[in-house]
């Protein structure tokens, strides 16, 4: 993804960040990662790993939706997209399966809701 992120991707990423960390600290990290041109940020912090996962999942889901849109296909079912993400995205050491599943569920729900 180059340039400014799509508003739907940004909204989904922020929603997931807020759900994972209600204090709002993760929101800033996610927004910084979304708007950064350097995607090789410091990968040692749990917060950065979560923010990177949020951005990656949001970008992936939006790409799937856009590809289906260009083929005039209806948006995929949320559970299908969520399952594909859980299979294809490796789980970082700093992120629990519960955190990953929460991020995936929120991002998929938010992006697909924009398409309906």
Image (cartoon, helix red, strand yellow):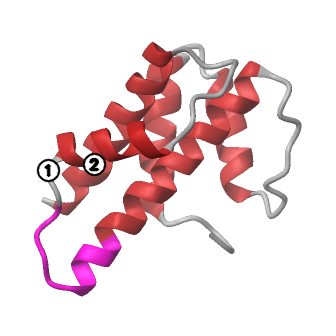
* Crowd band around label 2 with a 10 angstrom C-alpha radius: few (<14), some (14–19), many (20+): many
Q: Secondary structure at mark 1?
A: loop
Q: Which mark is residue 31?
A: none
Q: Gap in Å between the C-alphas at discs 1 and 2?
A: 7 Å
* Residue that appears at 14% across and 50% down: 77
Indicate the position of residue 2 as horizontal and vertical percent values.
68, 74
Q: Which residue is mark 2?
A: 81
Between 7 and 70, the one nearer to me in the picture: 70
Answer with the quarter of the image where residue 54 lies: top right
Residue 102 horizontal side relative to residue 14, left or right: left
Relative to 94, does residue 75 appear above or below in the rendering?
below
Please tell me whether residue 64 belongs to the stretch shown in magenta.
no
Question: Where 70 sits versus 92, above or below?
Answer: below
The quadrant in which residue 87 appears is top left
Q: Residue at x 33, y 74 (%)?
A: 66
In contact (CB < 8 Å): disc 1 and disc 2: yes
Circle 1 Cα neighbour tier, 10 Å, few/some/many (<14 / 14–19 / ≥20): few
- Quadrant occupied by the C terminus: bottom left
Determine the secondary structure under disc 2: helix
User: On residue 77, which mark appears?
Assistant: 1
Residue 6: x %, y % from top left: 49, 66
Q: Tell me the magenta residue range.
A: 66-75
């Amino acid at each position: 993804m180059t340039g400014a992120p799509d508003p739907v991707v940004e909204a989904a990423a922020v929603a997931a960040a807020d759900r994972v960390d209600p204090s709002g600290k993760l929101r800033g990290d996610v927004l910084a990662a979304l708007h950064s041109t350097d995607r090789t940020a410091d990968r040692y912090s749990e917060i950065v790993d979560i923010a990177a996962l949020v951005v990656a999942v949001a970008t992936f889901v939006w790409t799937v939706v856009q590809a289906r849109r260009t083929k005039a296909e209806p948006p995929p079912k949320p559970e299908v997209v969520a399952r594909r993400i859980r299979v294809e995205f490796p789980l970082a050491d700093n992120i629990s399966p519960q955190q990953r599943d929460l991020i995936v569920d929120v991002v998929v729900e938010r992006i697909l809701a924009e398409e309906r």
